[in-house]
Amino acid sequence: MAAARLPTRLPLDEEKGGAEMTYSSPTSMPDVDRKPGKPPILRVEATHDAARWASEHRKALSAVVAEHGALLVHGLGLRDAAETEAVFRQLGSLMAEKEAFAPRRRYAEGVYSASKWPPNQHMCMHHELSYAIEPPGLMLFACLVAATGGGETPVADSPNVLNALPADLVERFERVGWLLIRNYNNEIGASVAEAFGTDDRRTVESYCRAHAIEFEWQPDGALRTWQRRSAVVRHPRTGQRCWFNQIAFLNEWTMDSELREYLVDIYGEDGLPFNTRFGNGDPIGADVIQVVDQVYEENTARERWQSGDLFLVDNVRTAHGRESFEGPRVTGG
């Protein structure tokens, strides 16, 4: 079903908009299952009032996510979009998505469907909206219908990823940052209206100037943008250095080779819907993307979704992706 985005400015237990609740200590929550290769898992009994459960356990959930970076809740029994929205709102104040890279269905303010992405293709690890000036600090995912095969939302600890990457590569990205280049059109990815909430040129230009995005209108009316961002950031709560970006996810070498060749034939090397470079404009080679993806894989944890699940992910500390799947899948990821 949907992914919700919460602002980075405050940790979960300080977000505005959540309901007041009584709470003793994090130990009041049942034991969290920790196994190698899997995210932290909490198994609970289905309830007729999932929003109340979320309210009552809000600080305990926050404590677990603060300790482990993510928490998958099995058994909550979420049934529909309205109930999921109510649960999300108990866990913090939601934020509207801007600069989306792919179309989504909007269920409510700050609550969206998963990105439209081919089910037979793996979505590699990334940090949601890491190219935005104010990216979300916490991601909330819910599963209403689990896929019959695959479809996991894998996660990876970003400080561990950072430490495992080659030191010279990290130093280069820390020195020059990374650059996201986008070419908006009405055929592939999010359109200008879908990304910015409007197709009015003046409004789009004002947004870009306010969010450190360079832009250029093409002769055919299409929009091209450039934005330079940091590849490594410090966690706002712990101060940990985190590998925080979408360098691999939005790079041309992550695409299926046949799709990349087709898009280059149609749009040219500089006209791909999105691509990433080193912050000084130098190309990022396929070898770099292979190294990054390999390190992600070596640090990835996975668990199959069950219908009704809730997944909390610290977006700065923890990268997430989406595995290919079979059958219907109504979930965020």
Image (cartoon, grey):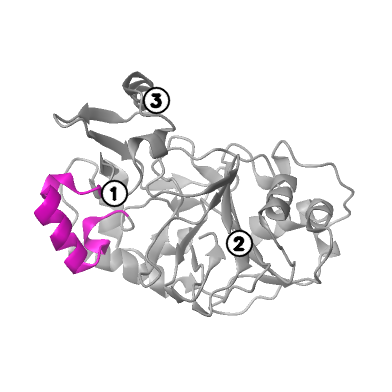
* Residue 138 versus residue 211 in the image, above or below: below
Camera-near label (3 vs 2) is 3
Q: Residue at x 37, y 73 (%)?
A: 120
Q: Is residue 321 left or right of residue 87?
A: left
Q: Is residue 91 left or right of residue 243?
A: right
Q: Which residue is mark 2?
A: 70
Q: Amino acid at mark 3?
A: Tyr
Q: Residues within 10 Å of mark 2 (few under 14, many from 20)?
A: many
Q: Which residue is mark 3?
A: 207
Q: Secondary structure at mark 2?
A: strand
- Distance in Å between CA atoms under marks 3 and 1: 26 Å
Q: Amino acid at mark 2?
A: Ala
Q: Which residue is mark 1?
A: 173
Between 121 and 80, the one lying in front of the other is 80
Magenta span of residues: 250-274
Q: Residues within 10 Å of mark 3 (few under 14, many from 20)?
A: some
- Sequence order check, earlier mark of 3 and 2: 2
Between 258 and 298, the one lying in front of the other is 258
- Sequence order check, earlier mark of 2 and 1: 2
